[in-house]
Image (spheres, rainbow, N blue to C red):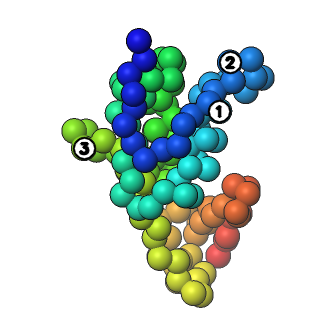
C-alpha cells in the first residue's frame, strides 16, 4: 500500500515507459513545482516520497541533492527539505568588484546564463 506523501506539491505522475529516467522526470517536475510554491514550502521526507511514488529512496535523495546544489531547496537533517527563498539579485552587478574579490585562480569567475550555459569572466 502506497503511503500518502504530505506536502504542498501537486500530484506527481512519472512515466515508467519514458526514455527519460525516473530521476530526471522527478527532478524536472520538482523544478517546475518550485516556481509555484512559496519560500519555505516543505517537501515530503525522502522515505515517504519514495514509497508514495514507488521508486527507490536513492532516486529521491539524488533529486533533492541536485536541487540543493542548484540552490533551489535547503535540506537539513531532522527538518526536511524546503523551498529556498529567492536571493535578492542586485540591480546592477559590479563585475570588476566580483573579479577583484574572487577566490578563483587567475581571477576567472564562472557564471551561468538562464539556460545553464557557463559564462567565464576573466580579469
Image quadrant holding the N terminus, namely top left
Q: How crowded is mark 2: few (under 14 residues within 10 Å), some or many (20 or more)?
A: few
Which quadrant would residue 121 be assigned to in this image?
bottom right
The tag on residue 16 is 2
Residue 117 lies, in percent from the top left, at 73, 56
Q: Is residue 76 left or right of residue 48?
A: left
Q: Is residue 36 left or right of residue 121?
A: left
Residue 97 lies, in percent from the top left, at 52, 83
Disc on the earlier residue, 3 or 1: 1
Q: Is residue 5 left or right of residue 21?
A: left
Find the distance from the CA under tag 1 to the CA under tag 2. 10 Å
The tag on residue 25 is 1
Residue positioned 38% across, 22% down in the render: 3
Find the distance from the CA under tag 3 to the CA under tag 1. 25 Å
Disc on the earlier residue, 1 or 2: 2
Q: Which of marks 3 and 2 is in front?
A: 2
Q: How crowded is mark 1: few (under 14 residues within 10 Å), some or many (20 or more)?
A: some
Residue 77 lies, in percent from the top left, at 25, 39
Disc on the earlier residue, 3 or 2: 2
Q: Is 71 above or below relative to 4? A: below
Q: Name the residue under label 3.
A: 79
Q: Is 3 above or below relative to 6? A: above
Q: How crowded is mark 3: few (under 14 residues within 10 Å), some or many (20 or more)?
A: few
Describe the element under mark 2 as helix, strand or loop: loop
Residue 119 lies, in percent from the top left, at 71, 63
Q: In this view, does 37 lie to the left or right of 80?
A: right
Residue positioned 39% across, 53% down in the render: 41
Amino acid at each position: 500500500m502506497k503511503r500518502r506523501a504530505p506536502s504542498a506539491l501537486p500530484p506527481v505522475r512519472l512515466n515508467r515507459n519514458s526514455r527519460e529516467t525516473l530521476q530526471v522526470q522527478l527532478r524536472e517536475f520538482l523544478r517546475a513545482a518550485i516556481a509555484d510554491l512559496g519560500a519555505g514550502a516543505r517537501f515530503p521526507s525522502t522515505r515517504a516520497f519514495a514509497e508514495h511514488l514507488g521508486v527507490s529512496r536513492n532516486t529521491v535523495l539524488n533529486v533533492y541533492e541536485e536541487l540543493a546544489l542548484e540552490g533551489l531547496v535547503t535540506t537539513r537533517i531532522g527538518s526536511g527539505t524546503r523551498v529556498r527563498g529567492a536571493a535578492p539579485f542586485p540591480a546592477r552587478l559590479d563585475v570588476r568588484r566580483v573579479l577583484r574579490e574572487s577566490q578563483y585562480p587567475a581571477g576567472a569567475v564562472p557564471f551561468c546564463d538562464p539556460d545553464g550555459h557557463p559564462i567565464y569572466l576573466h580579469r
